[in-house]
Amino acid sequence: MYGQPKTQSRVRDSISVQITLILVIVYVAFGFLGGDISTLNLGMFSGFIGNCPTWQGAASYFVQNNCLVWQGWVWMLFTSLFMHASILHLGGNILFLLIFGTSLEEQVSRRRWMTIFLASGLTGSIAFLVLGPILGQELGLGASGAIYGLLGAAGGLKGAVIMIFLLGLNLFAGGGEIAHVAGLVTGLVFHRWGDQLASLFRLDSQSAV
């Protein structure tokens, strides 16, 4: 009947499910653009921009190429969070996004959930930018840094230690342990000081995560 309030669905209205759908759509779109749905295709090597190696494929403009980021391609720090190297990479990230993400949904608002996801992912990207070249890693992609942030925010230090003991730090490929650790630390910060950060940045004042 008209006028009745819309009932909330745990699936349809879940931000974890919504982000999952975005990740799938992005992966499929770039799969068709690259001509290979099983793995991300950066395209043929096209030469150098400055001293940075580049490729012809559309995906090469969105994964995190540390060399190009230093030259001003800073959007890669954000867009790389939604890119995945293969179906296996995507599937692993989706599985744990749904596990940790839905757990966090029960503790915080959608706004704070999204803040934690993006802050953890971007912190991971920046850490990979600074430390990746030291370890010989120049290309990074994937939502795993953000997902480790969801883990830290939802489970706190105890939960994080248990999950790392069971699953390891390199469960999600794509950005390496550097981004994972940085994302996890960001999530733990939100777990411990969530309300203070919410007040400082004028986010919701919901109870600490």
Image (cartoon, grey):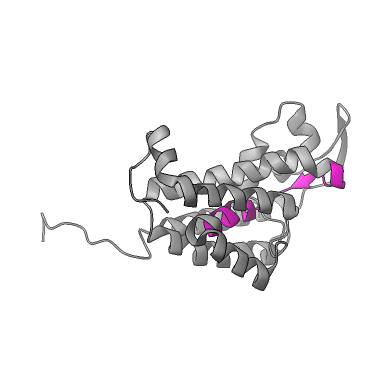
In the image, taking residue 91 as reference, residue 101 lies left or right, namely left
- The extreme bottom residue here reads 166
Does the magenta run of residues contain 88? no
The quadrant in which residue 88 appears is: bottom right
Q: Which residues are magenta?
A: 134-151
Of the 4 image quadrants, the one containing the N terminus is bottom left
In the image, taking residue 109 as reference, residue 5 lies left or right, namely left
Please say if 158 is above or below 208. Answer: below
Of the 4 image quadrants, the one containing the C terminus is bottom left
Does the magenta run of residues contain 145? yes
**Residue nearest the observer in this picture, 207 or 9:** 207
Please say if 162 is above or below 68. Answer: below
Please provide percent x and percent y for residue 193: 46, 45
Please say if 164 is above or below 177. Answer: below
In the image, taking residue 123 as reference, residue 6 lies left or right, namely left
User: Residue at left 37%, top 34%?
Assistant: 202
Residue 58 in view: no
Residue 8 in view: yes
The quadrant in which residue 9 appears is: bottom left
User: Residue at left 51%, top 67%?
Assistant: 99
